Image (cartoon, helix red, strand yellow):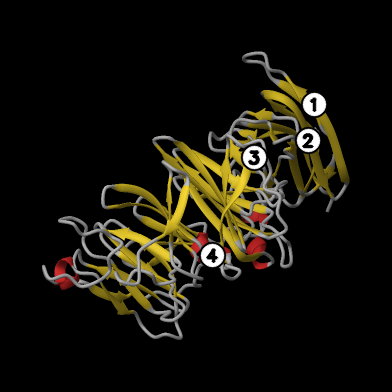
């Protein structure tokens, strides 16, 4: 008998794009609903309802926004035809505005602004004049006016060097508007020229050509990024007299406005070719940008949504074409350049506010991702699978004997080889400094192990994990 010991030093993210025998020991070809940020393997935490009442509507849910004010949070949900506000005192989702026509979710934009001395939430929808919401009275009104040239039906809005920039006007699809510089009686709802001069006046410019419409605006620290259907530009300068619009020379698949998220003055976005980020000069791919390539190839990103919370970015999309709502959420750890997928719930939209991540499910449930051990009552089925392992010797026969590990909770271990599949459930000892030895079976040249939850119950598997096996040379 040639007993040998091998260890799994740590648990990491999902990497689907490589042959699994080329993966590092801490990478998984298939994992879901787990947290590996500490190197240990833990079932992911879930979410709880933020408000007790569902948004019951026959219209498709498209957007979510949490508007934080001094008087508390306001929760907005948008369907293809209506904007709703949750009224806690009445426990209802109150319709606040009905669009003139159905509005796709990627044409809705929210922006916190100050108009004169008043704090407002600006809502652009692309089908008609923008809206403003006053949290002190919970009322909604139209933004701007024809007299001030600010009644354009735009769908993208950003603040850059104090001015309001807007785009997405269907009558002028390549046009970028900007407001007057606020101060001295001027406010961002005025887009006219001003007698004080060009540098405080409002105005507009056409970016590129009309058959390449603007599809998103994002303000960075020193530039305004202008995403178009087939290209990308940036506006440099802090006043109209020194504005320069420069085309970004980079090759990439154009993202949806709702699949973009800012982090540390970079703009990350997900397309069906992988994760990209704009660094202020050009578009780059993360080192692991292709990690989800097989998943993205078969998925539907037509209603993709994104949100960032701390050092984690979240992207929701459909696992296949034709689903009524996104059913996969990919979590990207920026600092570790690692991906993890989540499933078991739907996500019409995601939104981050004051260090919390919120979601709007396809069933109209507003949820807050927290330390709940379930997805608001639904079990979290967590698993992490190793690559196929030959222990450095494909020419030998191996017989699995046991797994030596520490942790807590009930763990299911599945060992697969050409000799068959063996599965066992074990309760890990939660006593400090204790170790659990899990008997295994299986014989073959290659093995794969799968660690998973039992009936959705939480578990923790500490790293490293040791595997005891017997190895024998095959007869020639």
Q: Is there a contact, CB below 8 Å, between mark 2 and mark 1?
A: yes
Tell me the CA gap for discs 4 and 3: 30 Å
Q: Is there a contact, CB below 8 Å, between mark 4 and mark 3?
A: no
Which residue matches tag 2?
413
Report crowding for label 2: few under 14, some 14 to 19, many 20 or more residues within 10 A (C-alpha).
many
Report crowding for label 3: few under 14, some 14 to 19, many 20 or more residues within 10 A (C-alpha).
many
Tell me the CA gap for discs 2 and 1: 8 Å
Report crowding for label 4: few under 14, some 14 to 19, many 20 or more residues within 10 A (C-alpha).
many
262 sits left or right of 293 in the view: left
Instruction: Give whichever of 56, 401 is nearer the camera.
Output: 56
**Which sits earlier in the primary sequence, circle 4 or circle 3?**
3
**Which sits earlier in the primary sequence, circle 2 or circle 1?**
2
The location of residue 79, given as percent across then percent down, is 62, 58
352 sits left or right of 157 in the view: right
Q: Is residue 85 above or below residue 321?
A: above
As drawn, the label of residue 426 is 1
Which residue matches tag 4?
106
Tell me the CA gap for discs 3 and 2: 15 Å
Instruction: Give whichever of 10, 34 is nearer the camera.
Output: 34
Residue 141, visible in the rendered structure = yes
Q: Is there a contact, CB below 8 Å, between mark 4 and mark 1?
A: no
As helix, strand or loop, the secondary structure at mark 1 comes to: strand
As drawn, the label of residue 418 is none
As drawn, the label of residue 34 is 3
161 sits left or right of 112 in the view: left
As helix, strand or loop, the secondary structure at mark 2 comes to: strand
Residue drawn 63% across the image and 34% down it: 45
**Which sits earlier in the primary sequence, circle 1 or circle 3?**
3
**Which sits earlier in the primary sequence, circle 4 or circle 1?**
4
Instruction: Give whichever of 165, 405 is nearer the camera.
Output: 165
């Amino acid at each position: 008998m040639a007993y040998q010991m091998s260890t799994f030093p740590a648990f990491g993210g999902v990497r689907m794009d490589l042959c699994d025998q080329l993966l590092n020991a801490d990478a998984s070809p298939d994992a879901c609903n787990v947290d590996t940020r500490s190197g240990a393997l833990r079932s992911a935490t879930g979410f709880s309802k933020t408000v007790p009442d569902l948004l019951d509507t026959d219209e498709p849910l498209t957007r979510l926004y949490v508007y934080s004010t001094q008087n508390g949070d306001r929760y907005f949900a948008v369907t293809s035809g209506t904007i709703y506000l949750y009224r806690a005192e009445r426990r209802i989702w109150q319709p606040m505005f009905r669009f003139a026509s159905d509005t796709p979710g990627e044409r809705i934009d929210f922006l916190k602004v100050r108009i004169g001395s008043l704090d407002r939430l600006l809502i652009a929808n692309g089908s008609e004049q923008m809206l403003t919401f006053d949290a002190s009275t919970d009322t909604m009104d139209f933004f701007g006016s024809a007299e001030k040239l600010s009644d354009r039906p735009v769908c993208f809005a950003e603040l850059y060097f104090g001015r309001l920039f807007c785009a997405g006007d269907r009558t002028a699809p390549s046009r970028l508007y900007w407001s007057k510089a606020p101060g001295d009686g001027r406010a961002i709802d005025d887009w006219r020229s001003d007698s004080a001069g060009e540098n405080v006046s409002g105005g507009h410019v056409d970016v590129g050509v009309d058959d390449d419409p603007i599809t998103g605006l994002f303000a960075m620290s020193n530039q305004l990024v202008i995403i178009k259907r087939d290209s990308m530009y940036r506006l440099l300068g802090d006043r109209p007299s020194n504005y320069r619009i420069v085309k970004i020379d980079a090759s990439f698949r154009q993202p949806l406005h709702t699949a973009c998220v800012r982090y540390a003055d970079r703009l990350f976005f997900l397309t069906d070719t992988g994760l990209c980020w704009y660094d202020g000069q050009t578009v780059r791919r993360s080192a692991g940008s292709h990690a989800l390539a097989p998943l993205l190839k078969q998925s539907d990103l037509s209603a993709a949504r994104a949100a960032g919370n701390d050092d984690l970015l979240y992207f929701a999309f459909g696992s296949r074409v034709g689903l009524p709502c996104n059913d996969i959420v990919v979590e990207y750890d920026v600092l570790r350049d690692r991906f993890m997928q989540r499933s078991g719930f739907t996500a019409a939209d995601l939104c981050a506010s004051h260090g919390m991540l919120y979601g709007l499910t396809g069933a109209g449930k507003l949820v807050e991702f927290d330390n709940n051990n379930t997805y608001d009552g639904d079990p979290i089925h967590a698993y992490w699978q190793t690559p196929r392992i030959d222990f450095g010797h494909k020419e030998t026969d191996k017989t699995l004997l046991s797994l030596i590990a520490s942790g807590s909770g009930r763990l299911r271990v599945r060992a697969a080889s050409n000799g068959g599949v063996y599965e066992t459930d074990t309760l890990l000892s939660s006593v400090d400094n204790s170790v659990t030895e899990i008997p295994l079976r299986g014989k073959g040249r290659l093995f794969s192990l799968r660690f998973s939850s039992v009936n959705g119950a939480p578990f923790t598997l500490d790293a490293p994990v040791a595997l005891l096996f017997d190895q024998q040379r095959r007869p020639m």
